[in-house]
Amino acid sequence: MKFINDMLSRTFALLLLLISSGLYSQTTKDNSMDEYSQLAGAMAFLLVAFLFVLFFVLSAPKYKYSGERRRERYSFLKKLSGILNRGVPIEREKDIMLDHDFDGIKELNNTVPPWFNVLFYGTILIAIVYMVDYHVLGSGSVMVDEYLQEVKIANEKREELIRTGAFINENNVTLMTSAEDLDKGKQIFMTSCTPCHGPDGGGTVGPNLTDKNWIHGGGIKNVFTTIKNGVPAKGMISWQTSLTPKQMQQVSSYVLSLQGTTPSVSKPPEGNIWVDSVKTGNDSLKATDSSKVKVDTSKVKTDTTKIKKDSIKVK
């Protein structure tokens, strides 16, 4: 009966500890709890833990070893230490003492401990097994083979990333013109973009995508950036969490393919007319050269006026 009571009391104390720890974990993990609730949970946990430890400390004398049992345990550990170390008792050290003496310090001729020999011969055995397994039978992979295998796996992952377009961004994106990519871009457009831009790109809530005017810039890079980051101020979400970079490239290319088409219902143009500098080439440089020519002609006109004035003076 006493044993049952002890077991019940210990079980109850353990349950209290588990319950308090659960309450404490809830107060620390729940962000909605304020600091006072967390402090109260921590104090409750520490209180129950202290009572739990105190309970076992007070009941510890019941389970102390008797003197005879402690002596048996000590003698067993002593025998085990003697077997592993093969040490010589202090009273017999004079039998193994060497004649070497340095400043009163004498050396003992102790044997190598058995535990050290076990480790030493164990390493030799492991080396033999390793050599046979890796270099004779070839069943294991040496470091070179493991390196080549890791390189192969890394290349496969890189090819997969390239195939899915993981490295595509707004700086290196290019225009797609293949029928397959444009068809995939159209499917994405019809699924995600028609509520705001209409099924043919004429625009509903969003702007018209078939004219030459662009609010946030035209061209593949600007359209890709707009689709990737969205326009939160106008209600357009960012699609980079829903679409892969390659899918955003495909739908951007499809949007640009709508240029010049005639939708059934179209909104008025918004934004500015976009001129792609890639297509125009060095036109901007030509314009700069013409301005220089105009400046030169103005100088020439000025010189002619001076000539006229000089001729009047001569007359």
Image (cartoon, rainbow, N blue to C red):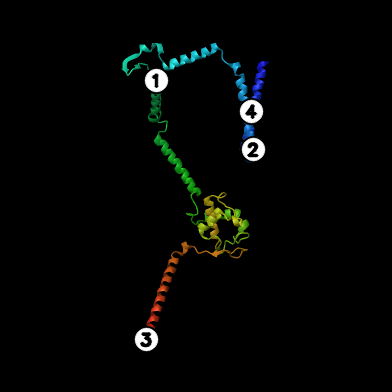
Nearest to viewer (mark 1 / mark 2): 2
Q: Amino acid at mark 1?
A: Asn
Q: Amino acid at mark 2?
A: Tyr
| Place of residue 188 in the rendered image (x, y in percent of width and height, measured from the top left) | 58, 53
Q: Which residue does the numbered mark 4 point to in the structure image? A: 48
Q: Earlier in the sequence, mark 4 or mark 1?
A: 4
In which quadrant will I find the N terminus? top right
C-alpha gap between disc 2 and disc 3:
101 Å
User: Which disc is residue 36 wearing?
Assistant: 2
| Place of residue 234 in the rendered image (x, y in percent of width and height, measured from the top left) | 60, 57
User: Which disc is residue 275 wearing?
Assistant: none
Please name the residue shown 63% across and 56% down the image: 195
Q: Earlier in the sequence, mark 4 or mark 2?
A: 2
Q: Amino acid at mark 3?
A: Lys
In the displayed orientation, state which residue is furthest to the bottom: 315
Classify mark 1: helix, strand or loop. helix
Q: Which residue does the numbered mark 1 point to in the structure image? A: 117
Q: Earlier in the sequence, mark 2 or mark 3?
A: 2
Q: Amino acid at mark 4?
A: Val
Classify mark 3: helix, strand or loop. helix
C-alpha gap between disc 4 and disc 2:
18 Å
Label 3: few (<14), some (14–19) or many (≥20) C-alpha neighbours in 10 Å: few
